[in-house]
Amino acid sequence: MNLAFVESPVQLLNVLEWAHARTGGDLLPGMPAQPAGSTPARAADLTVVVLSPTDPMSRGQLRRMAELARDEGFTVRWQEARGGAGAPLRTVRELGPMLSRAERIVIGDPFSRYVQLLLTLVRRKDLTVVDDGTATMEFVAQLARGEKLVRWHRRGRRGPRELVLAPVTLLARRRLTPTRARSVEVFTSMPVEPPPGITVTPNDFAWTRARFGPPKITRGADLVGTSLVETGVVDPDQYLEAVSALARAHGATRYFAHRRESPDKLHRLAVETGLEIVRPDLPLELIARRGPIGRMVVSFPSTVVHTLPLALAGTGIQVAVCDIAPEWLRDTASPRAQDFLSGVTEAARKAHGLTLMGPEARGGATLLGA
């Protein structure tokens, strides 16, 4: 049995993509089976455990993704992992027997303290890490450099909680290192250079393209929001000005909000820019593939500048990225923020053939497009 732990809608989407890739498309009616001698992960072999977050938008999208997973024949277990002080201990106790029976553990966020705690219970189990967005790039880079696992936007302060959990993080990192008894796979749409011993399997969003679309395409442009303000990286006033400039430059009328964007910020965007704020009930890759979607989709450096070109392959839709100017960053931003965000843009340019297309959205912001 394969056991997957997910905490976000995108992680669950990528678990479905991983399972689809393992079966060679056999989950789809009428598609040919995996060649003889292979070891596909069929629906009956995979149980997905949703470690439910607390914010309503994430929970809503996860509920919809769970429905899609059940429609594909997978077993989905909804775990209220954050429902009170005793929830973590209860969750670990309830999931212990499933962990012991599983042959392969699939995780979506190796930086998650919850997942790291569960990994301490895993010994000789094969592991797969599926994309949790651009954080996968940082995860693989930290493994290759032998560094501790720290999210790129954290400033590195070591408070009491971090000191208590440090042994858990260290042990989880060891679990994510391949040995003779344990294989480690990274299933990703991101350009990564893994350390020796880790297998990288490309995610080309074949399940998404087979299940949804082709999309209805509108004449205008759509903007994709980001939670960089909410994570303390980007100044809110600078962000608002950048969105306004992009909307004017490209005639955008809709703004697809990130699930973690605050209602107050979105209200301000709607009032001051006139954009229609859309709060998707599924990951944007599925929303865009279903349509309607603009002929151009403009995003700041984020996961979608890598995933949308794959999900929308063959549709003629142009994906563009507006880089983050240094003056947009807040004092609270991590010292690594600018390099990381610029790296996301540059990697997308190289991976998907993005070229300079101008004009500048704001001082210091270069607009790139397919």
Image (tube, rainbow, N blue to C red):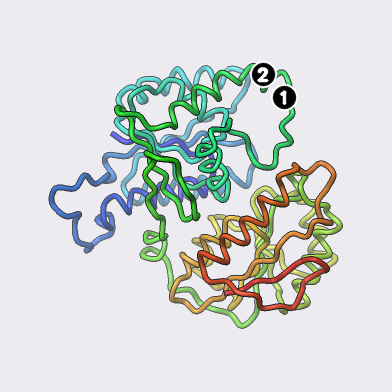
Q: Number of labelled discs?
A: 2
| Alpha carbon distance from label 1 to label 2 | 6 Å
Q: Nearer the viewer, residue 356 or 205?
A: 356
Q: Is residue 53 left or right of residue 78?
A: right
Q: Are marks 1 and 2 in contact (CB under 8 Å)?
A: yes
Q: Residues within 10 Å of mark 1 (few under 14, many from 20)?
A: few
Q: In the structure shown, which secondary structural element does the residue marked by tag 1 occupy?
A: loop
Query: Is 203 above or below relative to 2?
Result: below
Q: Nearer the viewer, residue 145 or 14?
A: 145
| Residue 45 percent coordinates (x, y) | 27, 39
Q: Residue at x 51, y 27 (%)?
A: 116
Amino acid at pointer 2: Leu
| Residue 56 percent coordinates (x, y) | 64, 43
Q: Give whichever of discs 1 and 2 has the lower sequence position.
A: 1
Q: In the structure shown, which secondary structural element does the residue marked by tag 2 occupy?
A: helix
Q: Residues within 10 Å of mark 2 (few under 14, many from 20)?
A: few
User: Image quadrant for the C terminus?
Assistant: bottom right
Q: Which mark is residue 73?
A: none
Residue with the mark numbered 1: 158
Q: Residue at x 57, y 44 (%)?
A: 138
Residue with the mark numbered 2: 163
